[in-house]
Amino acid sequence: MAEKLLLHTLIVLCPLFLYTIFFEKREGGGVYRPYLCATLQGAAVVLCMSFPIQANGFNWDLRYVPLLLTFLYGGLVPSGIVLAVILVFRLLLGGDAVAYGMVGAVLIAGFYFLLAGKFQTLRPRQRVLAAMGISLVSCVFPFGLFFLYHGWNGAMEQGSVNLVLFALFQAAAAGFAVSLTERTREINLMRREIQRAEKLNILGELAASVAHEVRNPLTVVKGFLQIMNEEQNEKHRGYTQLILSELGRAESIINDYLNFAKPQMQKVAVLHVVDVVNEVVTLLYSYGMKNGVEVECCPLDGLYIRTDKNQLKQALINLVKNAIEATPTGGLVQVCLAEEKGMAVITIHDTGKGMSKDQLARLGSLFYTTKDKGTGLGTMVSLRIIESMNGKAQYHSTPGVGTEVTVSLPLCDV
Ligand code: ADP
Ligand code: MG
């Protein structure tokens, strides 16, 4: 019996180990794979059910622990698959209590389903206890059916002590599995955070030195080209125009890098937010027109913040530009102002293509872009600047409908 208990515990923990050791994507946001999860947990269920623990003619196993884990961490599709595996395998095993076993599984799955949402809102510590509680309470269903099947006296003879033992052991296993899962998640999160910080550091240093060296000659070249532009025939003027615009692009990328390396707060002053927003909108109005997108401003007077104007402008320009670029011809980009709990709130709303959850998760990571000529720096720079101003930025996006970026910055007294 003890060997079987250990075996079952091992089976239940196996999916977690396999997943973290072999399948967890090593970098970036851990890509979640529902079918892999279903396969691993489904295999655990089959193994559990293949080696039932027998005591006083009463068979039990830990099949519901993988099911619970899938409901808590895997989502609906894998949970459905694991439930199906339990049902089919139970059918194959046969015996005279097949119907009871299957009804029990469905009832338990329903119970897990109801509680899974609530579980997500708990903190890691509470989760372990919650999982144990859920597991313990869920035993009501198979036990009820067990009594129904054997009748009260029969069931008591069969082994009521076993039932209690089983319930406790199952709860312990579930708690153990959940606490390991939470620990591994925490460690992975930490590792990712460290990797990110390291990357930022290296890039920052590199960017600062290279960008600085390149910017000066670029300015010289640009200046002379401008002079040449005035003295040339039509054909050559077209070329220099092109060179100038590409130089402008190079310059803005370099500025992005420099900014990214160190958002520089050079001239901190009290700003009237509506002025800055108006400037940004005016600046990008023609850019919007070129793309067939209307850029609109809904101003609000009386909001003052203390920060560097150029930095704030840079941050807003990147965000508004993204909004324009995401919006198809005929669309609308609105930049609105509001006050909320001592913060100036700037929302940039577009009717563009929006972003999926995956894209949202990757947004703001280095070099992430979906554009041919994109750099994947703009959002990152904006977020860094806003962060350095003690502000917050939040994205809400629906694919096909649009995106809303909410930037909140602390107000100051005038
Ligand atoms: P770039 O603009 O050079 O691609 P960004 O860091 O500014 O780099 O943006 C990264 C990516 O985020 C974009 O390529 C785009 O796919 C996505 N994105 C950013 N803002 C929006 C938005 N408002 N709507 C849709 N997608 C967006
Ligand atoms: Mg951009």
Image (spheres, rainbow, N blue to C red):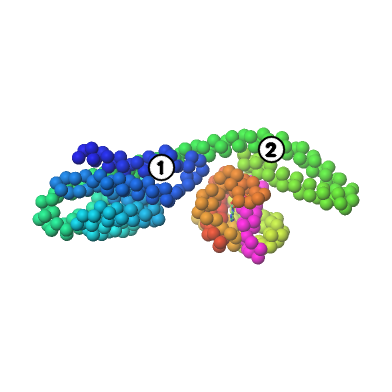
Q: Position of residue 15 (x, y in %)?
A: 36, 43
Residue at the image position 36 percent from the left and 56 percent from the top: 80
- Between 388 and 181, the one lying in front of the other is 181
Span of residues in magenta = 308-333
Q: Majority secondary structure of the magenta segment?
A: helix
Residue density around tag 1, few if under 14, some if 14–19, many if 20 or more, within 10 Å: some
Q: Position of residue 185 (x, y in %)?
A: 41, 42
Name the side, left or right, on which 202 lies relative to 72. Answer: right
- Vertical placement of residue 355 versus 375, above or below: below
Residue density around tag 2, few if under 14, some if 14–19, many if 20 or more, within 10 Å: some
For numbered disc 2, what is the local secondary structure?
A: helix
Do the residues bearing badges 2 and 1 touch, measured as CB atoms within 8 Å?
Answer: no
Q: Amino acid at mark 1?
A: Tyr
The answer, for residue 137, to whether it is visible in the render is no
Read off the residue under disc 2. 211
The stretch drawn in magenta includes residue 390:
no
CA separation, marks 2 and 1? Answer: 42 Å
Location of the N terminus (image quadrant):
top left
